[in-house]
Amino acid sequence: MSLDELARSAAADLWADTERTLDVETGLSALHHARNRRRVGWAVAAVAATVIALLVLTTPWPRRQALPATPPRPTTVETLVFQDGMAGLTALGGSLPTLTAKVKANAAASMSFAPDGSALAYSAGDVVHVVDIATGGDRKLGPCRQASCPVAWSPDSSSVVTAAPHALVLIPVGVGTASTVPLPSNWSITGLDVNMAGQVAMTGTAGTSQAVMTVDLDSGHSELVCTFDLHVDVGDPRWLPGGRSFLYLQWRGLQDGHSNDLSVREIRADGKDVRVVAQLGHCECYTPVRPSMDVSPQGRVVVSAVGRDRASVVEVGADRRLTTLFSAPINDSVRWIGTVAWRSVPAPP
């Protein structure tokens, strides 16, 4: 073999080795890229799975969203009772058969349920009565020495609180003797209410002025909260839940004994922050048919009053809207409407 042939053969062998080396490197590079692509694919798949899992866990199910929420079980049952000007008492929001034919009177009588709901106190003429809700038994509790004869209860439901000249009187429902809480000599009380701390909100007169007052049953400390001008009349103070402020009715008296512009007002026990809660419009607010108001332990406000041609009971909502609960034309059957009172008891299990 010639020298040229040997050179050409060596060159061919060298080129073949080079091609084999390049083929191996190319294969290794392809394998490396394939592995990288697989790693990226697994990473993307893992991220996608995580996102899907988070969406499933955090997004409410449509079926679950569509289910209505279970309403909470009421903790109390509140029943409104009022003198309907006809047969006696009407109950709304519950049945109180033991009060049927009770509190019959030719005029509005002050009424108040015991805080525990066990009894109803009411005034008839110059006598304070108590009706046992369980049995319907009606008994005379004691005399009332104030013409208006307002009634309320002590916080523990053990005594009925009423007014006398220059004092409040606490009459025990059970055994015991009546006790008094002195008031200033120029005060005369027409309406009262007691909160759970034993503080009494009162309306009446202080000297010659209509006034709002307070007194503490334990300490006897009294305060003249607010006075009004000659042509204003006020009545039926009622504590709001919490016992820091109370409502009262205010109307504009006229010389002929009639009045108009009945409104519900709120005042703090210290006499501050007086505001109008609701305007109820014209009221034929004359003695003995005065407007009446009560506030339930849950804060529901109800007012009864006589207008030009109708007797009505309305509820004042939190948004100041008025909802009529009872309304009847003034005629031979209904000539007036009396007082309102809330009864609140625990709901049955």
Image (spheres, grey):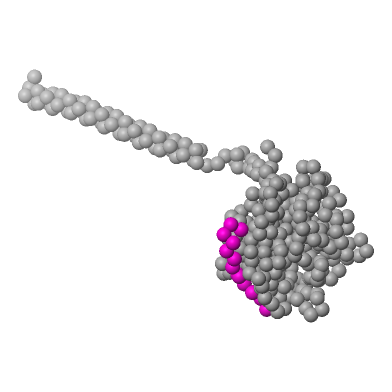
Query: Range of the magenta residues?
Result: 217-229
Give me the residue at 78% from left, 74% from top: 259
Placement of the N terminus among the 4 image quadrants: top left
Q: Residue 85 falls in which quadrant of the image?
A: bottom right
For the view shown, which residue lies furthest in the left direction? 3
Q: Is residue 12 left or right of residue 128?
A: left
Give me the residue at 66% from left, 73% from top: 186
* Residue closest to the eye, 152 or 259: 152
Q: Position of residue 131 (x, y in %)?
A: 78, 49
For the view shown, which residue lies furthest in the front direction? 177
* Residue closest to the eye, 22 or 311: 311
* Residue closest to the eye, 201 or 285: 201
Q: Would you place residue 230 above or below residue 125 in this image?
A: below
* Residue closest to the eye, 221 or 275: 221
Q: Is residue 178 magenta?
A: no
Q: Is residue 336 left or right of residue 246?
A: right
Give me the residue at 80% from left, 49% from top: 139
Q: Is residue 219 magenta?
A: yes
Q: Position of residue 11 (x, y in %)?
A: 13, 27
